[in-house]
Image (cartoon, rainbow, N blue to C red):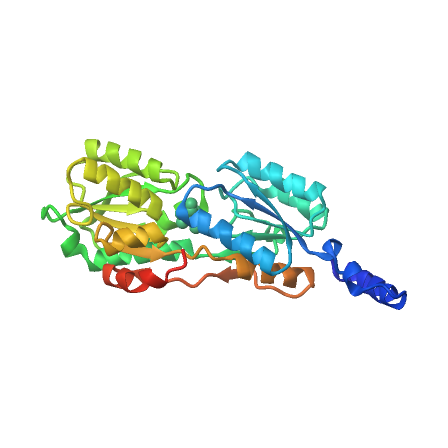
Amino acid sequence: MVKKTVTAASMLLVSVAALAGCSDSDASGDDDKIVMGFAQVGAESGWRTANTESIKESAEEAGFELKFSDAQGKQENQIKAIRSFIQQKVDVIAFSPVVETGWDAVLQEAKRANIPVILTDRAVDSEDTSLYETFLGSDFVLEGEKAGEWLVENAADSDVDGDGDINVVQLEGTTGAAPAIDRAEGFASAIAADPAIEVTASQTGDFTRDGGKQVMESFLNSEDGIDVVFAHNDDMGLGAIEAIEAAGLEPGVDVKIITVDAVHDGMEALAEGKINFIVECNPLLGPQLMELAEQVLDDEEVPERVVTEETTFTQEQAIEVLPDRKY
Ligand code: GYE
């Protein structure tokens, strides 16, 4: 099933088949399913795992045939996957771009092949917005702002060494990825409200636990008086906790930790007081994605941007919501 015209044609087939005495199931078999090609970033974090599960589950529930590809964090693999979806003539392509730039050529190929593209989770940085139908995902700048605002409000408690300066080290997400760029930007703009707060070191941990651990180890060796860690996701924060503990310090007390995502392991660390504050980023994008795909294929108007609703969590709130948390 591609566009309305084809749907109409296949409906005609259904009625012809019905007239000929065949059962409807012949015509509504696999051939009639919407085929979605989904090019995922990889499996770098708890967030990503929850996101992948949500997409697979929702595709099944919506009766889509899902062609799923894991790019293992490499843009070139994602581009290859998208090209192969085009060759296979899928009905719709959805993907979560590893990095923001460098997509125009392959998206033009999809457009020429008349295959609509939906961006999920991460945006592309392209002048030509006709290359995709819509973008479903979080407002990452806002997430960074929420993290920074919490720090401004809790500045006194966060000056762990009591020297009047709040030294923050930042564990950045994947270089060039929208959530890394935007969260850093939002955080910087919020902490500008308090001149005592300063980001003294910032480096990528590639959104992984291992990356966060390694970068934090090197920060603990090179930086004096670290008061706060701002990690662009829970996994890197959890890696930082390991490094902090290995250095004989108490995470959440000797070094305050702020993260983004609110996946299960992160929320547990928050409940235990090892993380101090988490900004939620919702990975359960599957149901909305399938709905948008159906609308696009039915030629319905869809909004250019669909923003996910999110909240924030303190330790008390984490303890309260953890038992019912789905991911
Ligand atoms: O925060 C991080 C993941 O793009 C929102 O990617 C996503 C981010 C998420 O690896 O954990």
Task: Please tell me whether residue 294 is drawn above or below residue 96 in the rendered image.
Answer: below
Query: Which quarter of the figure has residue 32?
Result: bottom right
Looking at the rendered structure, the number of numbered marks drawn on it comes to 0
Residue drawn at (14%, 50%) of the image: 159
Furthest-right residue in this view: 20
Q: Is residue 83 left or right of residue 318?
A: right
Q: Quadrant of the N terminus?
A: bottom right
Residue 64 appearing in the image: yes
Task: Please tell me whether residue 128 is drawn above or below residue 306 in the rendered image.
Answer: above
Residue nearest the viewer, comparing 166 with 240: 240
Residue drawn at (45%, 47%) of the image: 48
Residue drawn at (17%, 52%) of the image: 158
x and y percentages locating residue 137 in the rendered image: 48, 56
Residue 1 appearing in the image: no
x and y percentages locating residue 44 in the rendered image: 43, 41
Residue nearest the viewer, comparing 183 with 281: 281
Q: Is residue 33 left or right of residue 96?
A: right
Q: Quadrant of the C terminus?
A: bottom left
Q: Is residue 296 left or right of residue 48?
A: right
x and y percentages locating residue 157 in the rendered image: 14, 55
Q: Is residue 264 left or right of residue 196?
A: right
x and y percentages locating residue 188 in the rendered image: 31, 50
Residue nearest the viewer, comparing 124 with 195: 124
Furthest-left residue in this view: 162
